Structure formats: C-alpha cells, structure tokens
Amino acid sequence: MTKRPWHMIGAALLLFSLPQCTTDPAASVREAPLQGPAHFVQLVEDTANPYSPEKAALGQMLFFDPVLSKDSSLSCSSCHLPERAFTDGKAIAVGVDNREGTRNAPSLVNLAWITEGLFWDGRSPTLEEQAVHPVINPNELGSDWVTVLSRLEAHPDYPGYFEKAFGTGIAQQTVVHALAHFQRSLMSSESKYDSVMRGEAAYTDLELHGKHIFFDSSEDLPDGECGHCHTPPLFTDQTYMNNGVQQELAPYHYPDAGRGAVTGVKYDNGRFRVPSLRNITLTAPYMHDGRFATLEEVIEHYNSGGHPGLNVDPKIRKLHFSDEDKRALIAFLGTLTDTSFVRKLSDQKALLQ
C-alpha cells in the first residue's frame, strides 16, 4: 500500500466543510455542535468529547498520517480511501507487512448517527473506543500506543496542534477523540435520492421501477425486502442480521461467528451489522468477507434466497426477480451515490495554527 500522509492529500479526495465556531474566538478550545443535514435525525452532542472544528481538523491530519503505523508505511486512509467512499476496493483488508485481516474494510459514511456498535460485529460501542484498535491490531497498523505517542511528542508540530485543539498535551485519549471527530464529520447526503426527496430532481422510469422494488411499494412488482433493513435516510437500521450469505456448518455454527463472537449468544452467530447503502456503487466488493465483486452478484444472492440456516432472517427468501427487475434495482441503488462526497478534501491545517 502507498503512504498517504495528510500533507500529500490530492484532488482525488473529498471536500468537507467543517462547521464554523460561533463561540468566543479568544477561547483556547472552541466547541461548536456538529450539524447534520436537515432531513437526518438531529445529532446529540457528546458531553464527554464535545465537537470542535479544530479537533476534527487534527483528526483528519492523523487519519492520513502513517505515523500511527508500526513502520510508518500505512495510515488509516490506506484501507479507507476517500475516492471509494472510505473503503479500499479489496475483499479483505491488508495491513502492515502485507498481513491480511479477516474482513472487508467498511465504509465510513455518516458514522455520527451510528449508535448500535461499530465494526462488522459491533464490538466497539463508540467511535472513540473503535479508534483504539486499528493502531494496535497486528493485521492493521500493527503499532503500540507507547510508540505512537512518543512519535507524536517528538514531532515539530503535533504538540502545538493538540494544545490548540484540546488545550492539553498528547495522550491516547486525545488522539482517539480527534480521530473520532474527523470520522463524525464525514457526512454524505447529496445523492440523487436526496435531490428527489427535496423535489429538485426526478427518477428515470428504470430508477422508479427499482425504488418500488426496494421499498415494496407496488402491487405489480415483486417485493425486494430491501427497505426493511436499509431504511432511509441512513439506509441502515443499525441491526445485526444473518442474511444467508454463509453456509451453516452445524446448528448456529458458521465460518465467521460475527456478532455471536461478541455477545456469546448462539442466536447471534452468523449475524453482521447491516451496512449503509449510501455510495454503494463505490464500495465494492461487498459483504463482510468481500465475496461479491459486483452489485449484480449481490442481487442474485438475495434473489436466490441465500443459504438456509436456523437464524437466517425470514426476509431472506426467493424473490423471483426478472432481468428487468434486477437492472431497475441497480439503477435505484445508483441514485444513492453522492458525487459531492467524492471530491477534494480541504486542508484544515490553518485551524490549528
């Protein structure tokens, strides 16, 4: 993988406008509640880690800086490429020393609203807790926090940036808080779907056909059962489900236990977090193990009814799509792509100087 330090971010990256602070500019640490799109649920401020543009700007720098990895060869962005809606295009993520992980790198879209656990198995309840793990995971950045903090302390600029953002020195807590706020700032809400919902655009006939299948809204078309789990505006209901993608080896036993490995409940075996479908055309390959290279393969899986299993969700059944239905569903999914989300990421360094 290629190094992606923050100061080398190019035009392939994204444009995010971090909220402007409205509090006293003379304050050492400024706080400004993070604002989401009007048609999303209003965000609740985290009193334990209040948002500020400076914290998010520092998190952006850390996200793209290979200083967090064992050998300074990779950054968080190595597996979460902005031009791919913060995925990496690989079936299974690859970390330092070309060590292969165990699952597909998920998209980092609209995480500010995710409240029911992160990672495919939901093992981290918050973004702050989640940010601890990639740094020390031997299959990801493979470092340790003592080394990371020592490097940041020795850096000519980071101590001052942390003081500006947090009013304190460098610590594991401030590092993960900064990374969490950068990820919270990654909001996608300007797809064609959103424009149609605002009355600013209209679906094509094929897209409308696919929308009816997705939301089971036409008596003349087969039900797709999609919208029950991929509910707007996030296009995830944040639950964990067994979608029949793995073959059950024995009762409640699967090659990857997923959520069950976290909860210890056998009924959770084989269940994974329902991912958002926003920008889905950019995030192939699909599923927790990246087994499907295309959306056509994904739709064929659901159309076939998948593998049977004792805890496979009852919505997973044969759907009897025609070829036209499949094309229409893919056309509708294309309307969830936010082209404004795949642009240059503005340099926020000035906020810290």
Image: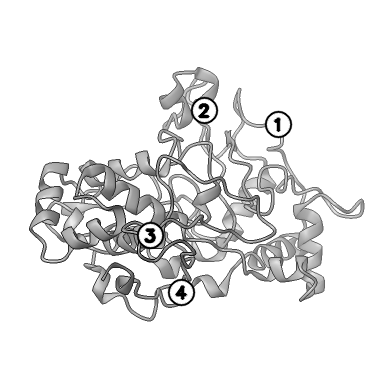
Amino acid type of the residue that numbered disc 4 sits on in the rendered structure: Leu
Q: Position of residue 38 (x, y in %)?
A: 67, 60
Disc 3 from disc 4: Cα separation:
14 Å
**Residue named by callout 2:** 248
Find the distance from the CA under tag 2 to the CA under tag 3.
43 Å
User: Which residue is denoted by mark 3 in the rendering?
Assistant: 56
Q: Residue at x 33, y 53 (%)?
A: 178
Q: Is residue 42 left or right of residue 256?
A: right
For the point 79% across and 55% down, the residue is: 213
Of the 4 image quadrants, the one containing the C terminus is bottom left
Real-space Cα distance between discs 3 and 1? 41 Å
Q: Given the image, on which type of amino acid does mark 2 rest? A: Glu
Residue farthest along the right direction in this orientation: 219
Quarter of the figure that contains the N terminus:
bottom left
Tell me the number on the disc at residue 201: none
Task: Point out which mark residue 314 bears.
Answer: 1
Q: Where in the figure is residue 142, as x and y percent of width and height?
A: 18, 46
Q: Badge 1 local density, few (<14 within 10 Å), some, or many (20+)?
A: few
Disc 2 and disc 1: Cα gap in Å? 15 Å
Q: Nearer the viewer, mark 3 or mark 4?
A: 3
Are the residues at dot 3 and dot 1 in contact (C-beta closer than 8 Å)? no
Of labels 3 and 1, earlier in sequence is 3
Question: Are the residues flagged by discs 3 and 4 in contact, CB closer than 8 Å?
Answer: no
Determine which residue is flagged by label 4: 15
Say if 316 sits above or below 19 in the image. above
Q: Is residue 243 above or below residue 213?
A: above
Q: Nearer the viewer, residue 16 or 27?
A: 27
